[in-house]
């Protein structure tokens, strides 16, 4: 198959895949001429298994990048074994410290069949769920949080500068935060709410708590040591439960 045919096939597959995934995904095709972008992308592939092994043997010649408004990205690339279908993997966020990734399992990529509609079902039921969880963990680690958000619970963490920060999972939770004054960092995906006016900050937290609850999403609030709470305490928020060492250990 000619390079042009390979390019068209990959770009077309990725376009359909993006349209079938849950949420608002867009697809961008990177041709072989975009060497710098491809090299940077290959370095951020968040995988220690199938896709990493492929890239170790065959440099990235072209790829399609699927992007979501919250900063999440997936990479679609050719299979090296000339079988039908493609490989897809998560892409690690920009500008997060290495420490944020410690103890976070890589959301390793998977192989997809040549049917993009069936492929979208596989991604949504497997890779995407693992990627969203890993994203929330590293983003929360980056803001000093010890308990990451979950799909059914958003954890807000006080920052030394008085801001509140969160790493929500899912577009609904992210939209509620933005509607209540949180601003998302486009590189890290972390949402932050200014603490310049503590009364307004507390009011925003109470309102977003009620709105998230209406969607079946709980809210937790972390008070790191030394942080003074705002003038108006967001009483509607439940306390974050204490995690013991025994609970924190992975199952054997």
Image (cartoon, helix red, strand yellow):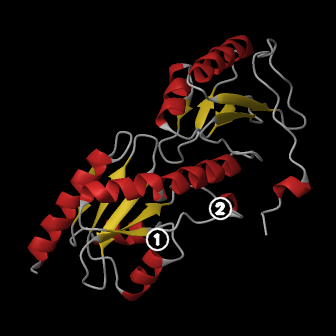
For label 2, count other residues whose C-alpha is less than 10 Å away and answer few (under 14), some (14-19) or many (20+).
Answer: some
- Local secondary structure at mark 1: helix
Q: Residue at x 59, y 23 (%)?
A: 212
Give the quarter of the figure containing the C terminus: bottom right
Report, in whole angstroms, how far the alpha carbon at label 1 lies from the one at label 2.
15 Å
Badge nearest the viewer, 1 or 2 = 2
Q: Is residue 202 above or below residue 123?
A: above
Q: Residue at x 47, y 42 (%)?
A: 186
> What label does residue 43 carry, if any?
1
Report which quarter residue 89 is drawn in: bottom left
Give the image location of residue 33, x and y in percent: 21, 71
Q: Is residue 52 left or right of residue 67?
A: right
Q: Residue at x 40, y 57 (%)?
A: 123
Q: Residue at x 46, y 71 (%)?
A: 43
Give the image location of residue 178, x and y in percent: 51, 26
For label 1, count other residues whose C-alpha is less than 10 Å away and answer few (under 14), some (14-19) or many (20+).
Answer: few
- Whether residue 18 is visible here, answered yes or no, is yes
- Local secondary structure at mark 2: helix
The first of marks 1 and 2 along the sequence is 1
Q: Is residue 151 above or below residue 108?
A: above
Q: Which residue position holds label 2?
A: 101
């Amino acid at each position: 198959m000619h390079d042009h045919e390979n390019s068209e096939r990959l770009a077309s597959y990725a376009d359909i895949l993006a349209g079938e995934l849950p949420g608002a995904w867009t697809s961008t095709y990177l041709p072989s001429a975009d060497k710098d972008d491809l090299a940077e992308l290959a370095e951020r592939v968040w995988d220690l298994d199938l896709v990493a092994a492929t890239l170790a043997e065959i440099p990235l010649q072209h790829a399609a990048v699927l992007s979501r408004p919250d900063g999440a990205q997936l990479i679609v690339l050719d299979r090296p074994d000339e079988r039908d279908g493609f490989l897809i993997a998560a892409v690690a966020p920009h500008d997060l410290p290495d420490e944020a990734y410690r103890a976070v399992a890589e959301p390793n990529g998977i192989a997809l069949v040549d049917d993009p509609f069936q492929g979208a079902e596989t991604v949504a039921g497997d890779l995407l769920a693992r990627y969203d969880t890993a994203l929330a963990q590293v983003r929360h680690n980056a803001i000093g949080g010890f308990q990451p958000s979950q799909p059914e619970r958003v954890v807000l963490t006080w920052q030394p500068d008085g801001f509140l920060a969160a790493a929500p999972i899912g577009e609904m939770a992210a939209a509620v935060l933005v509607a209540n004054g949180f601003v998302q960092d486009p590189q890290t995906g972390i949402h932050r709410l200014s603490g310049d006016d503590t009364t307004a900050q507390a009011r925003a937290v109470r309102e977003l708590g009620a709105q998230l609850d209406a969607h079946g999403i709980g809210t937790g609030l972390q008070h790191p040591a030394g942080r003074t709470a705002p003038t108006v305490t967001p009483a509607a928020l439940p306390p974050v439960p204490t995690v013991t060492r025994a609970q924190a250990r992975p199952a054997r």
